[in-house]
Amino acid sequence: MRDAAATPLPKLVAQNPYATYARVAAIFHPAESAQAGIHPTAVVAASARVAPSATLGAYVVVGEGTTIGERARIHAGSVIGDGCQISEDVVLHPRVVIYARSSIGARSVLHSGAVIGADGFGMADEQGRWVKVPQIGRVVIGADVEIGANTTIDRGAIDDTIIEDDVKLDNQIQIGHNCRIGAHTAIAGCVGIAGSAQIGRNCQIGGAAMITGHVHIADGTIISAATGVFDSIETPGVYTSAFPALPHREWRHVASVMRRLRTFAERIRALERRLGRE
């Protein structure tokens, strides 16, 4: 704020200039308006309900019993299965696929290629062969969520997979069945989250992080890019496990040392025991 008097020219002075820029840019570049109506090539089931102010583009498919809310914009080639709830002002960009019984909250935006509600990866081993476990839950997405291109969110095995309000998901993220992502969490591209993981509110997860299943991550946790999370995180903070890049020759030397760490530890314990007796 001390720079407010730096120039007599008109100016915006803000504590958070990046967020202020985002709001100003949105004013000068508003979302394209769409004419309400259903394209002649769209296929809408007889029992579906489409709000008069909604827009359905070319070759959109809407299943039985599905509801499309006011001012929703469903772009070309998107497919919405039976029994879905698409709330007001939702935007589905071209070729989004929403499986049956999924729910998308108000003002959420799904980018091209996103797949919501595919079967979770549930397989039971029986005498060396895999038996598929029926995935009977849903995907429930809150309001003001943004989902990037080619991101996939699996339906729950029994309970629902839940994405809470204002979650922001980048491109090419995989979220497994029965996961819960807390409100206001942001996840960067290529993250993989295995089934039944519980991610808290206001978390930030860097690109290509890998999170194993059935873990809990506390509210407000920050996970660095390429970090592997194999146990629950109960205390918020910044967590990193990726090893920084090294020249190849140096990396081979470090890897060789790391492979012998157990031997080194055993030798040190033996030396400590011997010195203790002396």
Image (cartoon, rainbow, N blue to C red):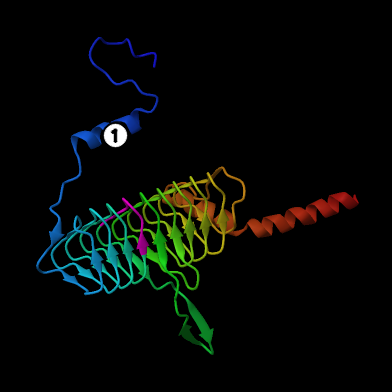
**Quadrant in which the N terminus is drawn:** top left
Few, some or many C-alpha atoms within 10 Å of disc 1 (few <14, some 14-19, many ≥20)? few
Magenta stretch: includes residue 26: no
Q: Residue at position x 73%, y 56% from top?
A: 267
Where residue 185 sits: x, y (%)? 45, 48
Where residue 160 sits: x, y (%)? 46, 66
Q: Residue at position x 37%, y 58% from top?
A: 173
Q: Amino acid at mark 1?
A: Arg
Q: Residue at position x 47%, y 84% from top?
A: 130
Range drawn in magenta: 103-111
Q: Nearer the viewer, residue 17 or 98?
A: 98
In the rendered image, the residue lying farthest to the bottom is 127
Q: Where does label 1 land, which residue? A: 23
Q: Residue at position x 53%, y 56% from top?
A: 229
Where residue 126 sits: x, y (%)? 53, 88
In the rendered image, the residue lying farthest to the left is 40
Residue 27 figure quarter: top left
